[in-house]
Image (cartoon, helix red, strand yellow):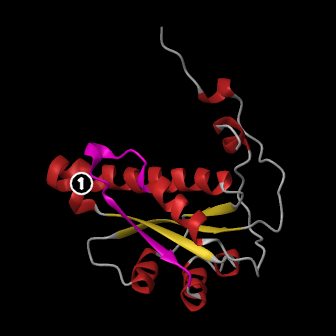
């Protein structure tokens, strides 16, 4: 197995997947376990996760996401949603507005790293029509979609994206 640093370095957004290669149930289960192992505010896990295998539903998600074709071309799409009221019970308005979204995105980030560790790839999709995605997934009124992850075995390995220099991002206070 790769160490953590290699896993992070090999995480890239992949938009072409091997069409006929399904994801093994054991690997998918391990990925979902890692997503649920992510830290969350007050350990509330104020998020829900939908696993979309259904081709028709993935095509609908594609249309709701500015027609990004890789969503329907990947064998699975994971939909990470926040549960604002779960956070609000303990943390009030800040939990409702922020913590539940953070919880969902942290879980999605853990899933992305687990996907790489399992020998697969993903693409994070945040640009979608929230109402359409909610309708497609038949979400309860209080549940909000935050991120979609298209996952599968890569049919391409894109070059690493350029990154800003650390001194442009990191600020030290002594």
Residue that protrudes farthest toward the top in the picture: 174
Q: 110 or 160: nearer the eye?
A: 110
Residue drawn at (29%, 54%), measured in percent from left and top? 97
What's the magenta region?
36-53
Side (left or right) of 170 relative to 137? right
Q: Position of residue 133 (x, y in %)?
A: 46, 79
Q: Which residue is mark 1?
A: 87
Residue that protrudes farthest toward the bottom in the picture: 56
User: How crowded is the residue under tag 1: few (<14 C-alpha within 10 Å), some, or many (20+)?
Assistant: many
Residue drawn at (49%, 53%), measured in percent from left and top? 34
Q: Which quadrant of the view contains residue 158?
A: bottom right
Residue drawn at (55%, 21%), measured in percent from left and top? 171
Q: Position of residue 86 (x, y in %)?
A: 22, 59
Q: 36 or 83: nearer the eye?
A: 36
Q: Position of residue 145 (x, y in %)?
A: 42, 69
Element type at mark 1: helix
Side (left or right) of 119 relative to 173? right
Q: Which quadrant of the view contains residue 71?
A: bottom right
Q: Which quadrant of the view contains residue 72?
A: bottom right
């Amino acid at each position: 197995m790769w160490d953590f640093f290699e896993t992070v370095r090999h995480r890239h957004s992949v938009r072409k997947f091997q069409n006929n290669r399904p994801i093994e149930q054991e690997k998918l289960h391990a990925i979902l376990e890692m997503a649920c192992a992510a830290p969350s505010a007050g350990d509330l896990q104020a998020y829900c996760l939908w696993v979309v295998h259904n081709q028709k539903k993935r095509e609908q998600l594609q249309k709701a996401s500015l027609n990004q074709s890789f969503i329907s071309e990947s064998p699975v799409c994971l939909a990470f949603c926040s549960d604002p009221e779960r956070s609000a019970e303990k943390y009030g308005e800040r939990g409702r507005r922020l913590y539940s979204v953070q919880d969902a995105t942290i879980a999605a980030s853990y899933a992305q790293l687990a996907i790489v560790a399992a020998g697969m790839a993903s693409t994070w999709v945040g640009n979608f029509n929230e109402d359409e995605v909610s309708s497609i997934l038949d979400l309860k009124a209080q549940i909000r979609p935050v991120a979609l992850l298209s996952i599968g075995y890569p049919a391409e390995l894109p070059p690493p994206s350029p990154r800003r220099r650390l001194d442009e991002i990191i600020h030290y206070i002594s």
